[in-house]
Image (tube, grey):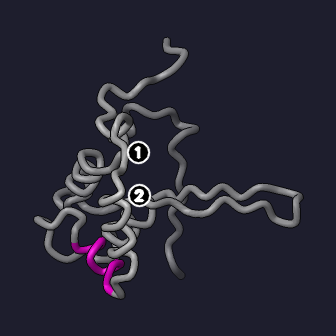
Amino acid sequence: EANYVTKKQDLFSAYKLTQEDKEEIENLGKDPRIGERIVKSIAPSIYGHDDIKTAIALAMFGGQEKNVEGKHRLRGDINVLLLGDPGTAKSQFLKYVEKTGQRAVYTTGKGASAVGLTAAVHKDP
């Protein structure tokens, strides 16, 4: 049993952005093709799958938390579920993100509870 989990290596926790880093980020933000560049930079060794790469990029950046009319809060988290036949690069995408994404943690269904992993699949009529 565990009471909490800590990530073994958080290489970015001690990293501080320099002024040069901030200027570079601002310049990248002005690039009209920045979205495409980000998508192409995710798992570049895997050809195609731009829809999956886009979903992963959005999840890595996260969404905006909203408080609807002060009544209830909508979390800004973006979750991605990858389904497919064996050998379709699902694990490779996730392992790439784990190595490059600061907030990413790789796990499998074996490491999660039934409550933590739920999904519904419906066949189109």
Q: Which mark is residue 92?
A: none
Identify the image quadrant of the C terminus: bottom right
Which image quarter: residue 52? bottom left
Name the residue furthest top: 1
Q: Is residue 91 above or below residue 46?
A: above
Q: Is residue 55 left or right of residue 64?
A: left
Q: Is residue 102 left or right of residue 120?
A: left
Report x, y in % for residue 69.
87, 66
Report x, y in % for residue 50.
28, 77
59 in magenta: no
Name the residue furthest bottom: 32
Badge count: 2
Q: Residues within 10 Å of mark 2 (few under 14, many from 20)?
A: some
**What amino acid type is highlighted by mark number 2?**
Met
Q: Residue under label 1, please give it.
A: 103
Q: Is residue 71 visible?
A: yes
- From which residue to which does the magenta span run? 33-40
Q: Are marks 1 and 2 in contact (CB under 8 Å)?
A: yes
Q: Residue under label 2, please give it.
A: 60
Residue toward you, 1 or 87 = 1
Residue toward you, 29 or 50 = 29
Name the residue furthest left: 45
Which image quarter: residue 30? bottom left
Q: Residues within 10 Å of mark 1 (few under 14, many from 20)?
A: few
Under circle 2, the secondary element is helix
Which image quarter: residue 34? bottom left
Q: Is residue 90 left or right of residue 26?
A: left
Dominant secondary-structure state across the stretch colored magenta:
helix
**What amino acid type is highlighted by mark number 1?**
Arg
Under circle 1, the secondary element is loop
Query: Residue at the spot x=36%, y=40% of the render?
Result: 105
